[in-house]
Amino acid sequence: MFEIIIILIYLALGIGLMIVGSMLVDLVIPGYFPEEIKKGNNAVGLIMASISISVGIIFKASVASPATEAVELTLIQDIGVVGLYYILGILSLMAGYKITSLFNRKYDLGNEVLRGNTAAGLVVAGLFIGIAIIISGVII
């Protein structure tokens, strides 16, 4: 029974972090995600999906990390470790987007996403998932 309660706690935490992650990344990408989704902007939909995938990858790695298994952590301490990696992950996604936009002089990635350019959404989605895989590799 205790394991089920732990699963439900981490599930609620994970879903909450995915929602907050989308809101935070929305601060650096032009436009407003909820409005863009209402318009049917597939590029933004891809980006939001990739944020959830990225948070899930980082979340899983932080929970499964051998470093946290080597030391007996309380539930609160473990959630703190997850939160720390989450913050690192979201900041990395935001920085990755900004750096990619800065170095890409051929087109304005933010404007392309706002126009609903699915290819631009895929570029950002791939960037986010790639960053999450890198971070999870370092954690594990």
Image (cartoon, rainbow, N blue to C red):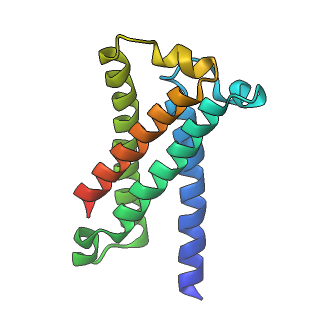
Residue 88 horizontal/vertical position (percent): 33, 43
Q: Residue at x 35, y 50 (%)?
A: 84
In the rendered image, which quarter contains the C terminus? bottom left
- Quarter of the picture containing the N terminus is bottom right
Q: In this orientation, which residue lies closer to the viewer: 23 or 105?
A: 105
Total numbered badges shown on the rendered structure? 0
Q: Quadrant of residue 35?
A: top right
Residue at point 64%, 28% (across, down): 33
Residue 128 horizontal/vertical position (percent): 42, 40
Residue 130: % across, % down? 36, 45
Residue at image x 51%, y 22%?
29
Report the front residue among 41 and 79: 41
**Residue 74 in picture, x, y percent from top left:** 37, 73
**Relative vertical location of residue 60 with respect to residue 42 in this rendering, above or below:** below
Q: Residue at x 34, y 29 (%)?
A: 95
Picture quadrant where residue 116 is located:
top right
Q: Is residue 121 above or below residue 114?
A: below
Query: In which image quadrant can residue 47 be found?
Result: top right
27 shown above or below 111? below
* Residue at the farthest bottom position: 1
Vertical position of residue 59 compared to residue 45: above or below: below
